[in-house]
Amino acid sequence: MSQEKVDKYKKEKKNRAKKLRKKRAKNYILVLLGFALLGGAIGYPMGRFIYRQNYSRRQESARVTAIQYDYWFQKYWDANISSELQYPDEDIASDTDAISM
């Protein structure tokens, strides 16, 4: 029985460096993963909060590009002004009216 203990001890001693490296690598990965999860759990809600707080300030200083203004003006023109400037149907001259004059 004593020889069995000695053999077991020698075997454990032989593999001790490998086991220690595996344990350290596992702990290192777990710590990195824990910090990543903690950072995400704190950073994401905080980032959303800060984004919402500064939204109105960003809108005040936002610039409107010419393309955006042209698009808005075209929509506004079509909805409000163009229908008022059209001629009534009976006042529109046709090709035959132009020839008969």
Image (cartoon, helix red, strand yellow):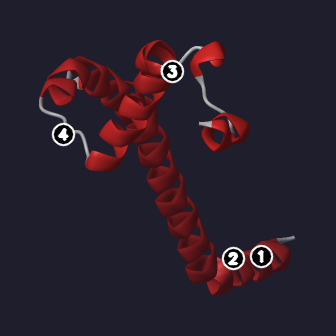
Cα separation, mark 4 vs mark 2, equals 70 Å
Mark before the other along the chain sequence, 4 or 2: 2
Q: Residues within 10 Å of mark 3 (few under 14, many from 20)?
A: few
Residues at badges 3 and 4 in contact (C-beta under 8 Å)?
A: no
Residue under the image location 19 percent in, 30 percent down: 58
Mark before the other along the chain sequence, 1 or 4: 1
Query: In the image shown, does 101 or 91 lie closer to the viewer?
Result: 101
Residue type, numbered disc 2: Glu
Mark before the other along the chain sequence, 1 or 3: 1
Residue type, numbered disc 1: Lys
Q: Which residue is mark 4?
A: 63
Residue type, numbered disc 3: Gln
Q: Which residue is mark 1?
A: 8
14 to the left or right of 69: right
Spot occupied by residue 19 in the image (x, y as percentages of width and height)? 63, 73
Quarter of the image with the N terminus is: bottom right
Spot occupied by residue 57 in the image (x, y as percentages of width and height)? 14, 23
Cα separation, mark 3 vs mark 4, equals 34 Å
Residue under the image location 56 percent in, 81 percent down: 17
* Residue 64 picture quarter: top left
Query: In the image shown, does 36 or 67 lie closer to the viewer?
Result: 67
Of helix, strand and loop, which one carries label 3? loop
Of helix, strand and loop, which one carries label 4? loop
> Residue 86: which numbered mark, if any?
3
Residues at badges 2 and 1 in contact (C-beta under 8 Å)?
A: yes
